[in-house]
Structures are given as C-alpha cells and as structure tokens.
Amino acid sequence: MDNTQNTARGKPRAPTRRQAYEQKARRKSLLIAAVSSAAAIALLVVLVPMAPGWEAVQRSFFNWNVLVKTFPKLLSAFTLDLILFFAAAPAIFILALVIALMRNVTRPALYPLKLFAIVYIDVLRSIPVILTIYLIGFGIPGLGLLPPWNSPYIWGSVALVLAYSAYIAEVFRTGIESIHESQRSAARSLGLSEASMMRYVVLPQAIRRVVPTLVNFLVALLKDVALLSFIGPVEVLRQAGVYKSLFANFTPYVGAAIIFLVATIPAIRFADYLMAKQNAQRTR
Amino acid sequence: MSDAKLSLRNIRKSFGPLEVCKNITVDVHKGELVCLIGGSGSGKSTLLRCINLLDPIDDGEILLDGVDISVPGFDPDPVRRKIGMVFQSFNLFPHMTVLENIKLAPMKVKRMASRDITEQAEALLDRFGLLDKAHVYPDRLSGGQQQRAAIVRALAMEPEIMLLDEVTSALDPELVGEVLDVIRQLKAQGMTLLLATHEMGFAREVSDRVCFLSDGELLEIAPPEKMFGAPEHARTQQFLERVLRTQNLS
C-alpha cells in the first residue's frame, strides 16, 4: 500500500522485494570477492619473500636502479616493434584476404589458385613461426642480395606476414562460410554476379563477424614481432638482452614485459568488448 | 499454350533419392496471379527456386517468353533480372540500409547511376509506405516492414515476373495484412505473380488459378472458386479441410 502511495506522489519508489533481495546478494558477492582477492594477494606477498632464493631473485629481476636506467632506451626500442607491426598488419590483412578468396574459388580454370592457397595455408600453419622467420630471414638475404634488400628487417617482416596471413586467411574463410546461404540466394536472385555477391554482400558481413578474432591475432602479432630479435633487428627484446648482458641483471626483461603488458592489455579488453557486443546482437 | 509468359513443362527435381518435383507442368500468363498451395515439403519452394535458377532442374523445360532458360549452362543472370524473387525470411542484407539494399542490384547489375536509382527507389518506397525507413537498417524494422522492403528491392530491378515464397509465413499474424496489401497492389498493376502460400483466404481472394501440390506432384489446377469450393481430388479435399479448419479458428 505504502509503495503505491509513494509513487503516486512522485516520491522515489521504495525497492521491491525482488530488488532488495538482489541488492543484498550483490553486496554479499562483492564483499566475498574483495576479501578472497585480498587474502590471495596477502598470501603471495608474505609467502614469496619467504622462499630461500627471494633475495637473489629480487636483486636480479626487480632492481629499481637498473629499471630506471634502461627503461627509456627499451621504450625507444619498442618503437621499432611498433613500426614493424604497423608495416606487417595491413600486408597480412590484404594477403590473407586474397588467399582466403583463392581458397574459395569454384571455377575449374582457376583451380591452380585454389591448390596454391591450400598448400600455402597448410605449409605455413604447420611450421613454427620462429622457424619461418629463421628460414626466410636468414635464407633469402643469403642469396647475395644487395642492400637494402638483404636487410633482416625486411625479410623478418616478410616471414611474419607469410606466417600470419596463413592463419588469418583461415579466419576469413570461416567468416565467409558463416554467412547464411539465404544471403547468397537473395544476392543471386537479384542477378548479382558471383564477384559482386562476394564483394558487396558476403565479405562485408564476413569481415565484421571476424573482427574480434582479428583483434586477438593482432595482439599475438604485436608480441611475435619480438621474435625478429632472433635474426638481428634491435627491437625491445633484443635491447633488453643487450642490457641484461651489460648489467648482468634480468630487470630489463621485466621492463620489456611491462611495455608489452601496457601495449596489449587495452587491445585484449577491446577484443573482449567487441565479442560481447556481437554475442549480445546475435541473441537479440 | 505458346503465349504463356512462363511455362513449366514436365519439371523434375530430386535431392538425392528424394523426388521433390514430379513431372510438374503449368503455364502462367502475363498479368496472372497463380498460387501454389500444399503442405510443407510438397515442393512449392523448390519449384520457385528452380524457376529462378537458384537450383537446377533435373529434367523438363522452363520457358520464359518461349525461350528455354533451363538449358544446362544457360547464363542465369539475365534471367534473374526478369524474374524477381522474395523469400520467406526476407533475406535483406543486414549491413545495408533499406535504400542501399534496394540500390545494390540496379547499380551493380544494370549499371544505373546512383542518383537515378535513388529517385526510383524512393518512389517505390513511398508507394509502399516505407519512405521514412529508407535510411534505417533492417534490424530496426518490424517483420512486415522488412518483407515489404524485400519486395521493393526485387521490384527495383523491374522484373516481369515475381516469385513470392511464403512471404507471410515468418510474420506475426497482425503484420500479415500489410504484406498481402502489397501483393494486391502488384496484381492491380498487372504484375505476373507466382506465389507459394499458406494464406488460403488470400489465395481464394486474389488468385486467377490455384495449384495444389502434394509430395512433389501437381495434383490439381483450378480457379479459386472451384479449388476451394469443389476440389476434384480426394487429397486436395483432405488438405483443405485440415487447413481451413485451423485457419477459421484463428
């Protein structure tokens, strides 16, 4: 009775039984989560320093002075990672799309393209990325190419592009195949050619659908740029290695890890957000 | 026989061991509205898809203005320009607005200028009460609006025949009327229409002729008064009794 009278006079409505119950449950679960997290962190803080080697580890991995001294240089080395990343990503996107389309070819005359795409994807997906980088990064400059074409920057990036485009071609292919047959029927019934149907109807929807997966792959790519350090380019991991030798201390590696964390976590959250959004749309 | 707009001769179609069209022969004349009725799985949808060359027929002939369009290897695209098709589930392109949906085929297939087709599309949308939805994405429309938009999309190609495949089956009952109104309009304008439908009352009202299909066979062709008044075939009677009993209830 009180409830209805309150709303009639425009006063804030008292919570319903259900709302009150849910509010209480929410508060309780928040409290439990906070307490258990605090306990876990406290345990770590107390227990880890009790390990016999903690002093030594702290000295060689978490040395504040070394971190301060090396961090700016690590950061500037990271710009090379970013440059390689931004050079490779668009190339991967385009190459992967081309390979995925070749993989989907149905016309008999174009069968060699399809065969090439199948072999390309199979081979590059089966070889560890680091091995592809070694083989191409060392192998091709070894042909005796002249500068700048013997640069490990170029061939290392090419190796990354090849390896990643094989994975992403498969992502695109799944996207293309996920578009319902009824969309193709509609496009064909309007007289659109196969090519127009692909370009205007299927691909735009397919690409949209795989965006979250693509973002995840971009995160992986950003980290895998560090693999190029094995064939020469002085990017952040290599720079950290140089400092490790110089200071006889592992802290620069921790510094590099911090840089990667800061760079990738927003992208990971963004991918989560996109995926949640798509799920919400699909269940609507 | 020979003056038929669309002529189906002895159409056969199987999916594996399942025969979905058994020797179907029927003519549709210019400006005529022919309804296909029959239970689900009777072959209505498959027949429509075959006419639009979405599925190839196994045997028989499909003549459009006397030309056999079912010859294996026949280029389907020019045919589809003359035959518009609308589907049960609308099949609008979800990443395009209503107007973009309508403009796509005229621009890419007929190579029309964007401005010309926009004018034409807006006139069509206006005629079917959708002009205010031109820049809206399909997921913001009701089922009835989506289906009307899909009909407009097919009309924008200026087809000579329209195939409508159970276009009201996916709609809430209160939205069926607006789509049926559109079909009445099309008939009034002289469009040649072939539609598969479960709306018996509507079929009775607007059809020039009704075809009853059962298990892939065309059992009976008759004017609506005869089909719904005194059907010849026992299976037709059975089917109509069952369907009309439930439809009268609702």
Image: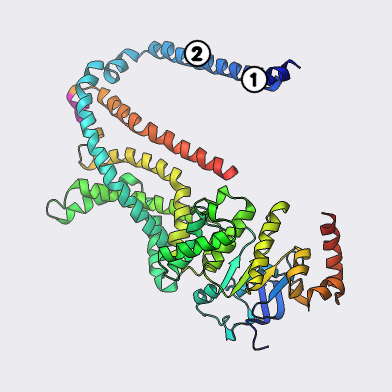
Q: Amino acid at mark 1?
A: Gly
Q: How many marks?
A: 2
Residue A22 in the image: state x and y as whole percent: 65, 21
- Nearest the viewer among A55 and B85 is B85
Which chain does the numbered disc 2 sit on?
Answer: A
Magenta stretch in the rendered image: A240-246
- Nearest the viewer among B116 and B226 is B116
**A255 left or right, relative to B162:** left
Which chain does the numbered disc 1 sit on?
Answer: A
Where A140 sits versus A2, above or below? Answer: below
**A247 left or right, relative to A44:** left
Residue A21 in the image: state x and y as whole percent: 67, 19
Residue lying farthest left? A146
Q: Nearer the viewer, mark 1 or mark 2?
A: 1
**A22 left or right, relative to A157:** right
- Say yes or no: labels 1 and 2 on the same chain: yes
In the rendered image, which quarter contains the N terminus of chain A? top right
Where B9 sits versus A128, above or below? Answer: below
Q: Earlier in the sequence, mark 1 or mark 2?
A: 1
Label 1 to label 2: alpha-carbon separation = 45 Å
Q: Which residue is mark 1?
A: A10
**A275 left or right, relative to A19:** left
Main secondary structure type of the part rendered in magenta: helix
- Nearest the viewer among A150 and B64 is B64
Q: Which residue is mark 2?
A: A39
Name the residue at 25% across, 43% down.
A84
Name the residue at 86% across, 60% down.
B245
